Amino acid sequence: MQIERVTSLQSFDALEADWRALETGSARNSVFLGWDWQRLWWTHYGCGRQLRILVARAGNKVVGIFPLYLEHHRVARILQVRKLRPIGAGGDTAPDDLGILSDPSCEEAVTQAFVHHILTRCERWQLLDLVDLPSDSPLVDCLARRASHRPALIERAPPNLITYGELPADWDRYRQSLSRNRREVLGRKRRKFEQQPGARFHQIVDDAQIDPAFDRLAELHRRRWQGRTEELSFTSEQYLGFHRDMMHALLHRKRLLFYALEMNGEIIAMFYGFRHAQTCYYFQAGFDPQHAALSPGEVLMGYVIEAAIDAGCTRFDMLKGDYDHKRHFFAQTRQTVDIRVHRPGLIHWLYRVKQWRLERRTPPPRHAGPIQDEQTVAEQVT
């Protein structure tokens, strides 16, 4: 197996056919590792960063891609650190399920080859900052297995919880899976909405409607969260440009889930998500607070889940963010993890001092316990 490094935009674009072929064949693929997300992310967020995509070939066949880039940060406002990070991480749009895209027939071998190459052949990085890795991925296992043989340190952060649910064959069975109270509340709110003049739920599937609908989603999201959080989405030029382009790309591949709740000819709530294989993903939403009495966000989510079931989806994934409103609909959880691999030296020492000072200022969580998996640990890695 040969590993090559892609460092130019021309070589990146030349990978499209092989990339899409791996997307189709990989059981671990996600929207966030797909060609459209990765290539568009680089278009909007790649300025000032250097491509370091790793490609694994067996003979003439591409069997693995590890999309990475190199960037420079300052530590303690003094020294510059060279970070190796996944494409998709580091901007103001939050992905999940990053990592390695590989042929399932040689997933372990591809992962080991990439890890070996990064740790022994890629000399310029000082910090390998891997985020949003599925906790059961071979990459996480590989780093853990080789943790005692090399002079570098790994920090494994507490896991990120993601809410999801398995979808039954029809809407009635889903409703029966809810508690009696939730079932009655959901039904009552839907009936109240449907009694409003011009009430309707619909999917946006016309390419010409994407841009005005996107503008409305951004407006509704800002209205909903203005004053409630300091980290509003749909504000930066990069975020707006990336997701507008992403919607068009997903629509053309029949993967866009873009829904609206309308009343009197006015859209009062919107849902933005994706479909990948048999899974529906919830990414962003917004509603007009002036209509909060109708619970438009909750009503819309019920319609979207019903539409996903009717379309044959078998799973609904709420993605990152452990919020109460997500647990109203589903109760199962999965995990992603963030892992940092350091090269030993002054940079690593400064990070340790920074973390120590942060821990001294931050009170421990209420339910902190001795479970090592859920604490940040330092181990030696190959």
Image: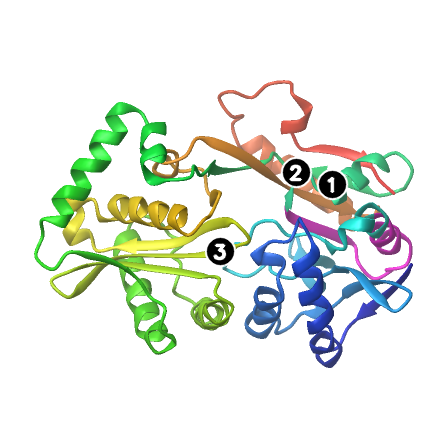
Q: Quadrant of residue 32?
A: bottom right
Of residue 302 and residue 337, the one placed in the foreground of this image is 302
Return the disc, 3 or 1, that comes first in the chain's sequence: 1
Residue that numbered label 3 is attached to: 275
Q: Secondary structure at mark 2?
A: loop
Of residue 51 and residue 173, the one placed in the foreground of this image is 173
Q: Tell me which amino acid carries mark 3.
A: Arg
Q: Residue at x 41, y 34 (%)?
A: 330
Relative vertical location of residue 249 with respect to residue 66 in this rendering, above or below: below
On the picture, is 60 further left or further right than 280? right
Return the disc, 3 or 2, that comes first in the chain's sequence: 2
On the picture, is 23 further left or further right than 368? right
116 inside magenta stretch: yes
The answer to whether the residue labelled 2 contacts the one labelled 1, judged by CB atoms less than 8 Å apart, is yes
Q: Tell me which amino acid carries mark 2.
A: Ser
Report how far apart the C-alphas of labels 3 and 1 lie in the structure: 26 Å
129 inside magenta stretch: yes
Residue that numbered label 1 is attached to: 140
Q: Secondary structure at mark 1?
A: helix
Report how far apart the C-alphas of labels 3 and 2 lie in the structure: 22 Å
Residue that numbered label 2 is attached to: 135
Relative vertical location of residue 284 with respect to residue 47 in this rendering, above or below: above
Q: Tell me which amino acid carries mark 1.
A: Val
